[in-house]
Amino acid sequence: MRVNGTRRILRVCIAATSLATLASCTSLPDTSGYTAATVQLSNSVRLTGDIVEAELERGIAAIPDEVRTTRLESDSKEFSEAWGITVKSLGALSEYAESIELLTTAGNAGQANAQALSDSVLQLAGAAGLGPVGAAGNLLVETGSRLYGEVSNLLAARSVRQSLEAADPIVQLSLTKLQQETSTAERLFKALISEERNGLDRRCDAVRNVEIRLDALAHEVAVAATAASSATNDANASRLSIGREANAPAIADCRSAEAAIDAREHEGVALFVTTRAALKAWSSSHTKLLTAVRERKPVNIQSLLAASEDVRTLITKWRDI
Amino acid sequence: MTIIKGPAAAAAVLEALLPSLQASLDAARSVSDDALMDAIEAAKLRLRNFANSTMAANLNDSAEVEAVDRIDKVARDLHSRLTIGQIGMAVGAISATAAELNALSAQLGLLTDATERAAKSIALDPVKKAVDAMTAMVNSVKSLKANLDAADPDEAQVIAEIDKLAEQFEALRTAVNGGG
């Protein structure tokens, strides 16, 4: 009886192995790069919000009290809340990408998972006093694990495909909305930067007028120099020098403030442009992922990874300003 | 940039500029919010360029300098008021889109949950958890039985083992229901 039982197990094993070979599938695409890029994108969108928040503070501060409205304060608060929701939506996209990765990992690790389950079952059998399973039992476990490795691959491929297909319209619409948010935020950013320049002009107008007067005076002194005595020329040169020295710190302060605004505008706009490009790459990568799963081909998301790297570089640059 | 010298010239240029700005904003308003934002930005630039082009004909005449400053202030204040309008518009648009994104996130969240459940199921997580919980229960029952069969059972130990068994049963129930 025991010999017959073992033969039956062996027959099952051979049949199962053949079935596994027939069903043999390619690995599901590695989506870890996609998940990492999604997280990077989320950081980038969060940073664009931080940038606008900081410029809102600076821009509003540049508006004179008599022009300022009480609504400005609630506008700032409303922006922070709305951007929080925008970032949260990217968190939802990241969690979604992670769930796809979890699924492809489960599909690719079917044999190991089945083996772990078999180990658990053997432990239960041991605890319940059913005794060791023997060589035939071990063979059955091994074959079952291998077979499950293929089955899980098929199951995961189907689930990944179903999930990607169901999510695609939501993902595409979300990305359109995110691009819209980023564009509006960029317009707001530029509006605030120009207000900061306007504020700087208010502050520096008088200083610049003094500089113009000094330049004019220098011209007059130069014209009169030939006719005037050396003592008069020396006195005029000395007065000019004192005037320029007195105005120099204020001029330097204005120039440095202007340079700081220019730098923030330059890096800020670059980050907005790159973030929008990364959002576009993310959107097309989702479609590529879906195609790759449908056709059981490797997924190519190089453009997304490159965009993600650009974003990372700019985030670092911005933090250095 | 052409220099506008003296308060009279500055006032004349600003008077001519304002209706032109109004016309460009009105035209953009009928197109889209984005077009209006861009038109406002362009108008602000013209105002700033104007204010930066003016100067007193005689910089040593403080009355004239002040008169030009007052005209500049009109342009600069209008610039600020336009910015305030832009802030309100942009924040309103961002809030409205954020609300739409929130609804989309909720939809995506449901799909994420379903995908995670499928991943766990394919990874045999619920079955493995149930089997592990059953193994723990069997071991507890064996331990309880051994204690009860002893000549002098330890009452406190028996109570602790029954409590443990109840916890393990709960763990099994959760595992079978696909939780944990």
Image (cartoon, coloured by chain):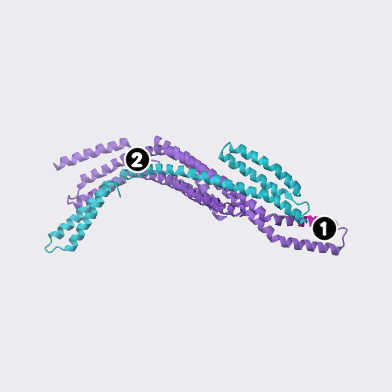
Secondary element under disc 1, as helix, strand or loop, is helix
Residue matched to label 2: A156
Q: Is residue B135 left or right of residue A187?
A: left
Q: Is residue A300 above or below residue B162?
A: above
Chain ID for cyan: B
- The quarter of the image holding the N terminus of chain A is top left
Q: Is residue B135 left or right of residue A105?
A: left
Which of the marked residues, 2 or 1, is nearer the chain's N terminus? 2
Secondary element under disc 2, as helix, strand or loop, is helix
Give the residues drawn in magenta, as a range. Answer: A213-223
Q: Is residue A220 magenta?
A: yes
By secondary structure, the bulk of the magenta-drawn segment is best described as helix
Q: Nearer the viewer, residue B151 or A143?
A: B151
Q: Nearer the viewer, residue B14 or A171?
A: B14
Which residue type carries mark 1? Val
Name the tint of chain A in the rendering.
purple
Residue A233: x and y, percent? 84, 62
Q: Residue at x 64, y 43 (%)?
A: B43
Residue B69: x and y, percent? 71, 52
Tag 2, which chain? A
Which residue type carries mark 2? Ala
Q: Is residue B17 magenta?
A: no
Decide: few, some or many residues near mark 2? Use Cα within 10 Å; few <14, some 14-19, many ≥20.
Answer: many
Residue B120: x and y, percent? 32, 45
Q: Residue at x 65, y 38 (%)?
A: B23
Closest to the camera, between mark 2 and mark 1, is 1
Residue matched to label 1: A221
